[in-house]
Amino acid sequence: MIQQQLLTVCYLIGSITFILGLKMLSNPASARKGNLVAAAGMTIAIFGTIFLYKDVESGEHLHNYLWIFCGLSIGGIIGTLAAKKVQMTAMPEMVSLFNGMGGACAALISLVEFNHLSKELALNPNPDFIYFIQPKVLIIVVGLIIGSVSFAGSMIAWGKLNGKVKDFSFKGQNILNLMMLAFAIGTAAYLVTNPHHSILLYVILALSLLYGIFFVMPIGGADMPVVISLLNSFTGVAAACGGFLYDNKVMLTGGILVGAAGTLLTILMCKAMNRSLKNVLIGSFGGNATASGGGASIEGHHKEISLSDAAMVMSYATKVMIVPGYGLAVAQAQHACHELEKILTEKGVEVKYAIHPVAGRMPGHMNVLLAEADVSYDNLLEMEQANDEFPTTDVVLILGANDVVNPAAKTDPTSPIYGMPILDVELAKTVIVNKRSMKPGYAGIENELFFKPKTSMLFGDAKKVLQDLCSEIKNL
């Protein structure tokens, strides 16, 4: 009895730390501490379960400690090494991969628990017992479908983010997807009412995995932040189903928090792109289909600026706004960027960073990137704040960003990004764009900003360009 009460306290502590940790994640200054608080709560919940849990029916405690701690050790070592070694450019892939593992765990829980129910059903096949277990079977199939979709979709997202999987779509794919999903749900409904047909569970598993693959396959690169956020919410819901199955309060709380937070973030990301979730899921924006078409052709010539001229313009500016993009992450140039900021600040220049909600390959990618270089959180401006300051900005330095500064979102109704809120960089007096080449961004759309009279191109690797700029400014 005392052990059960202690376990309840452990779960209560875990649930509270999850809520506090999530709250602290809303502020960049407290985000790291929030992660540690939530991790501490999870640790308490895990060890509480291992040493204090007792099965209600059998009255037995967990006894397979060797397997449990082997699994914890292997997973802990792999996770720690992966997190320490991952480059900031590969962070979105790692998030997708780890999120997929969470979905796989939820699906495996459903398979194991249904196997237990099947054995009980074989010993007690009367209608009353079937009626009694139907709610549990419902939770099992819901967890299986959502977990499998999350796993398969996350694996495809991981492959697309690291370039191993290409966008793929065909005529009628959306209809096929809906048919697979409807068939999986219909089969699940039948299995809930007839749980002795255990083979149907594997039919549901196969359909869910296929749906997860075909669901993410046509979605293009520009929408990957939204997809990652959506799949993350799926994993949370699947984990919450596991909490229902085991009557585990901390698992239920954690799953609900992840599911709710992921859903809200997905909605906010869609709002930032001025698109509906339905449009994201079936529109294939940023994929091959739109990369080759849509948007007016751009005529004109771009102009280049030399390093010395760029250094001169920035040194004598009153306010400089830096717009980071995925190109900054690719070049691992965040530290060089922070060095440039410090040099300009020493010269009396006000330096701020303009962060678009969907810049990079996952939600908050640029914030994490700059935090790694110890950039002050006070210097990071959200899109609305930055847009208010662009008219009084002397120089905007764009580092690898493309689609989030493309004026076509406001001026070209035929463009796939038309209507998406962007950073109004063209309101500044001078715009300097650092890119490796004139190739389109991840969404495959030409950027008319590069041909504007105020805009000058500064070609080269972001890290080297920033280092050279620092040297030039120091010598002025």
Image: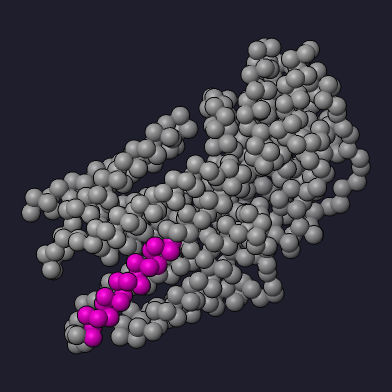
Q: Quadrant of residue 463?
A: top right
Q: Please indicate whether residue 432 sits to the left or right of residue 332 in the image.
A: right
Residue in view at x 47 percent, y 46 percent: 81
Q: Is residue 160 visible?
A: yes
Q: Quadrant of the C terminus?
A: top right
In front here: 352 or 471?
A: 471
Q: Quadrant of the N terminus?
A: bottom left
The residue segment tinted magenta is 103-122
Colour pattern of the rendering = one colour
x and y, in percent, of residue 475 in the image? 78, 13
Q: Is residue 105 magenta?
A: yes
Q: Please indicate whether residue 118 sits to the left or right of residue 265 in the image.
A: left
Q: Is residue 14 visible?
A: no
Q: Quadrant of residue 371?
A: top right
x and y, in percent, of residue 117 in the image? 26, 77
In front here: 127 or 360?
A: 360
x and y, in percent, of residue 215 in the image? 57, 67
> Can you name the residue that lies furthest to the left here?
1
- In the rendered view, tell whether residue 310 sits above or below residue 275: above
Residue in view at x 43 percent, y 61 percent: 103
Q: Quadrant of residue 428?
A: top right
Q: Is residue 329 magenta?
A: no
Residue in view at x 58 percent, y 41 percent: 88
In front here: 393 or 254?
A: 254
Dominant secondary structure (helix, strand or loop) of the stretch shown in magenta: helix
x and y, in percent, of residue 115 in the image? 30, 77
Q: Please indicate whether residue 80 sits to the left or right of residue 43 in the image.
A: right
Q: Please indicate whether residue 271 sits to the left or right of residue 456 in the image.
A: left
